[in-house]
Amino acid sequence: MKGFLRGFTTQEKSWMMYDWANSAHSVVVATILPIFYNTVAGYMADSALGMSTWGYATSAAMGIVALLAPVLGVFGDFQGMRKKLFTAFMLVGVLSCAGLAVTPLLDFTTQQAAQTVGMAVLALYVLSSIGFAAANLYYDSFLNDVTTPERMDKVSTMGYGMGYIGGSTIPLLAFLILNLILGSDKMLFCLSFAFGLTAVWWFVFSIPMLRNVHQTSYQPRTPGAVGKALKGIGSTLREIVRHKEMLVYLIAYFFYIDGVNTIIHMSTSYGDTLGLDSTSMLLALLLVQVLGLPFCLLYIKASQRFGARAMVAVGICIYMGVTVYAFFLKEVWQFWVMAVLVATSQGGIQALSRSMFGKMIPDKNRSGEFFGFYDIFGKFSAIMGPALVGWSSGLAADIQLAKLGLTRATATAQQLEQIDSTAAPWGILSLLLIFLVGGVLYMVVLPRVSQTKQPIGNPVAMANKGD
């Protein structure tokens, strides 16, 4: 590991290690937990709505963070506050994962018990997602503290690469090995172990970030500074609107990152709804993590050759193809092919999007505030995508029920399961619309805006020079 990270400073390495730490949540909670929730939902009164409910819960969690993001960013910009707030939200996520470790050990085999456990799972999932997303806001805004604009693409992308070889891979692999050793009859214990390991992993590997990364860009805390900064949120928004390149970029990002996040959160729920084998899906997702690092390194090299903007465009096109491919997915081997396609661009598109925005920020002392707006666009997109998938799949199911002269009340459990399975692909296909809108804005509108001559000395223009 030491040789692998040669050439990076201690602060850069410690910052990247947090991706190693929190990626356990990204994989274990975002991919294994939906399968467990679908199992619990199978004992509820309406077992066919598992995928839709999960989509709405994801949207609720992201909505809460999105609404709070600008305010969180403002407070994080004050001297000495960024790390304190980062730590608080990281602990919210860690403790929520610890709570999730208890849920598989509870009895949920009756309808009433399933409702109670299901609500507990959703509540802890929402809390863990809030902690994860809010801590990430401060983690992202630390990027300007730990490195320079010239190194930002490399450091940001390597951060995602660290996540792939660490938190995204090792806890999931430990879960799969334990499940293989103990057998399927001990699956609930294995799930409990996975959620508990995620909590421990997340906390322990956050320690280098807590010890070595320090806030160097900040606003001084003076009397009345908080009120002034909160009132300044509107002026920051107006500043973003005035810089057309940043505005168009954020709107494009709002759409295309929505599809990326939705596929991350909904992939196993979708496969489970289609009746695919859970273990095979998790092995495919493990492959995504294993391939993630080499593809991140490839994105670093390619961005140095062709530019970060060109490589993000490549990622958008690949995800469009993934969405269409997923519509026709029926077999486990096809899920594996989809996993490889996702692996090619998942880390690269997120990392380069983050570093591109970091370079655009005109006042580095207000990184948290600007990344707060960046998070608004990213998190509100995460509301739209899962909700759209849930609504589209639910609408398709209702149409099929109507054609058969049935309702959810009159259809049998077997009929509901079959209809839900055939309706789910329409929910995934709806993401193509989101990628198309984001792609057009990014690949057609943004270049035209970027070519518009900006005033001499404009910090946004200067920050983007050479990107």
Image (cartoon, rainbow, N blue to C red):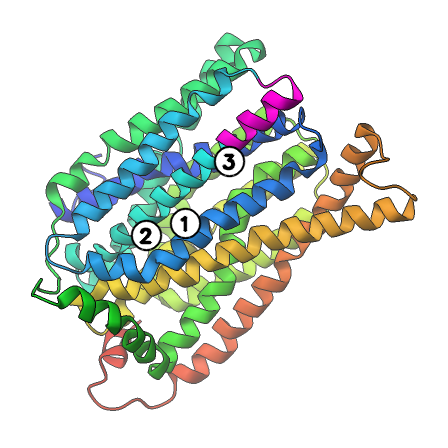
State the image quarter where residue 183 is shown.
top right
- Mark 1 is surrounded, within 10 Å at the Cα level, by few (under 14), some (14 to 19) or many (20 or more) other residues, namely many
Name the residue beneath numbered marker 3. 122
User: On the picture, is 58 further left or further right than 367?
Assistant: right
Q: Secondary structure at mark 3?
A: helix
Callout 2, which amino acid?
Thr
Q: CA distance from mark 1 to mark 2?
A: 7 Å
Give the crowd class for mark 3: few <14, some 14-19, many >=20 residues within 10 Å. many
In the image, what residue occupies the spot 68% across and 38% down?
Answer: 49
Give the labeled residue for mark 2.
157
Name the residue type under label 1: Gly
Task: Looking at the picture, tell me which residue is in the foreground, 116 or 37.
Answer: 116
Task: Report x, y in % for residue 44.
Answer: 67, 28
Is residue 115 one of those drawn in magenta?
yes
Q: Position of residue 196 (x, y in %)?
A: 37, 23
Q: Quadrant of the N terminus?
A: top left
SS assignment at label 1: helix
Counting residues from the N terminus, which is met first, the one under dot 3 or under dot 1? 3
Give 286 or 67, whichever is nearer the viewer.
67
Disc 3 from disc 1: Cα separation = 27 Å
Residue 429 drawn in magenta:
no
Looking at the image, tell me whether mark 1 or mark 2 is earlier in sequence order.
2
Callout 2: SS = helix
Q: Which residue is mark 1?
A: 347
Question: Can see residue 393?
Answer: yes
Residue at x-position 43% and y-position 56%:
379
Instruction: Determine the image quadrant of residue 193.
Output: top left
Image disc number at residue 246: none
Look at the picture and state if 276 lies above or below 89: above
Which numbered disc flags the more N-terminal residue, 2 or 3? 3
Tell me the quarter of the picture where residue 233 sits: bottom left
Position of residue 80 in the picture relative to residue 16 (left or right): left
